[in-house]
Image (spheres, rainbow, N blue to C red):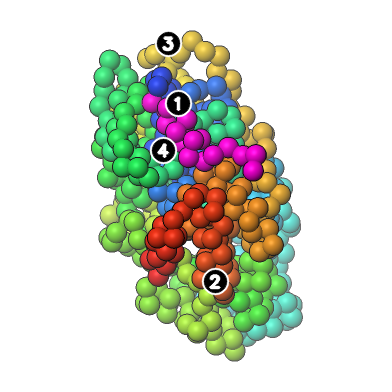
Amino acid sequence: MNQINPEHQRTLSIQALTEEPLDVLIIGGGIVGSGVARDAAMRGLGVGLVEQHDFAFGTSGRSSRLLHGGMRYLAQGRLGLVRQASMEKRILHRIAPHLAEPLAFLFPTYRSTDWPLWQLRIGVKIYDLLCGGKNFGKSVSLSRDETLRRTPTLNAEQLTGAVQYFDALTNDARLVLDTIRSAANAGAIVLNYFKFTDAHRESGLWRCEVEDRLTGQNHSLRTRAVVNATGPWADGLPHSHVKLRLTKGIHLVIDHSRLPVPSAVVMTTGKRILFVIPWGERVILGTTDTDYGGSLESVGADRNDIDYVLRVVNEFFPTARISMEDVISTWAGLRPLLANPNGTPSDISRSHEIHNPEPGWWDVAGGKLTTYRLMAEQTVDQIVKSLKKLNGLQRKIVPCRTADEPLLLPADIAGLSGILPAEFGRRAVEHFCVNEWAVHLDDVMIRRTGWHYYHTDADRKAGQVAQWMGEMLNWSPAQRAEELKHYERANK
Ligand SMILES: Cc1cc2nc3c(=O)[nH]c(=O)nc-3n(C[C@H](O)[C@H](O)[C@H](O)COP(=O)(O)OP(=O)(O)OC[C@H]3O[C@@H](n4cnc5c(N)ncnc54)[C@H](O)[C@@H]3O)c2cc1C
């Protein structure tokens, strides 16, 4: 095989990270950290990024996968937020069309609810305008009969009609990986399983302590600026000034034949919104929004969460009788919302904040998957300005180009859905290990392929992938067994 050895590649990356001072060290390989890394590297800065687990291990691999302005925020009158996100969803469609598939949403309305049809009719028109008048399709209003003709299994009792509007479906973990690959392509040094542990100021720079979690070795590096982009972990980091309120959201995956919807469907309970989202031969159901105080490392969907989602789905599709037996897989993520002790979780703002509490240190928190590019642009603007002032940055720094420059395309084996035909198997696994930093079985099964969530025989596939990865990465039989055990533990 004429390929670079992943272990050797990692050693070179560690050397490059620790030799000379960086301009920016980014902590966190979720969508925000990878967005900042890509933007900063494309402008000409010397960039390093460290992620304690795998890239997209955190919230950015566990979202509802929507690029959206947010109909719910529109109802709350947050026009600025909706406009910002709506413009960003268009930009993402331009720079990564393979990761922004336009998707129609049917929003049915019922008598005596918080979502009257007349209001929604106006709302979707405003929604289209907030996209600069260029949404992926024109929203329409539907009569009761037309709504039932399109979605015959929908609950007809008290139904008054519907509106249909457009957002886009992405593959969140793939968006992170392709952004990281683009960052690396622009010169960023990126390392997963590499944890930031501490930092202090030293001669006008930050000295950061990091731990290689694959070998247990500690390293030290110097950098002019640090970005804390650790999502739900952000308020636990040394030097962080972030205050978060974490809320959990879960998703269920079932077969499309059990709920054969032609488009996404919006389901409301009071002011809350849940979605049915078509995903290939499956549909995704979610999500919840409840305060969370448990472990950040293992977040799961518990029985109460699952029952809640199933109850709402069965209210809207009573004849479908979806039950626990239909559930193929689940995932749960934590929203890193900016703290506001008052108000229900759903009321807390999804806006983002960028703070520079100490010289050369930035905390970036809040926001959404949809707005990550803008968050990155604003952060790097601040860093460039500060480095010029504090460190007399001499090199030529070019303006932000992330809104125009396409994301690096995935190799032809990885598409939007993350649903890879098994025949690509071995070749795909090699690609993930050599070009996409896959180290463990779950890196491939969960984040690089989505097979874990999609396939009913995911456990059997995991055995096959473990075999291929073992050959590629020289695992002993004991290591292979351990990988399988770890994969099982990670997802039960
Ligand atoms: C249920 C749910 C559904 C959502 N749906 C949508 C949606 O449909 N559309 C949308 O736009 N947004 C959605 N969001 C919001 C969006 O997913 C998040 O805002 C976004 O993913 C946060 O990204 P992040 O990079 O800040 O955090 P994360 O993705 O969590 O990344 C932070 C990373 O930092 C790493 N880290 C932590 N500490 C350290 C350390 N010491 N050293 C190194 N690395 C460290 C973590 O391991 C983690 O990988 C949803 C959120 C949830 C919870």
Stretch in magenta? 1-18
Badge 3: how crowded within 10 Å, few (<14), some, or many (20+)? Answer: few
Residue beneath disc 2: 460
For residue 50, the mark is 4
Say whether mark 4 is within 8 Å of ligand 1.
yes
Could you tell me if the residues under marks 2 and 1 are in contact, i.e. CB atoms within 8 Å?
A: no
Where residue 29 appears, as percent x and y from the top left, is: 45, 43
Residue beneath disc 1: 16
Instruction: Residue type at mark 4: give it.
Output: Val
Q: Residue at x 42, y 52 (%)?
A: 58
Instruction: Residue type at mark 1: give it.
Output: Ala
> How many angstroms separate mark 1 from mark 4 (CA)?
13 Å
Q: Nearer the viewer, residue 183 or 399?
A: 183
> How many angstroms separate mark 1 from mark 3 (CA)?
23 Å
Q: Which of disc 3 and disc 1 is earlier in sequence? A: 1
Local secondary structure at mark 3: loop
Please state which of the two labelled residues, at mark 4 or mark 3, is closer to the viewer. Answer: 4
Quadrant including the C terminus: bottom left
Q: Quadrant of residue 219?
A: top left
Measured along the vertical axis of the image, is residue 126 above or below residue 3?
below
Could you tell me if the residues under marks 1 and 4 are in contact, i.e. CB atoms within 8 Å?
A: no
Main secondary structure found in the magenta portion: helix
For residue 392, the mark is 3
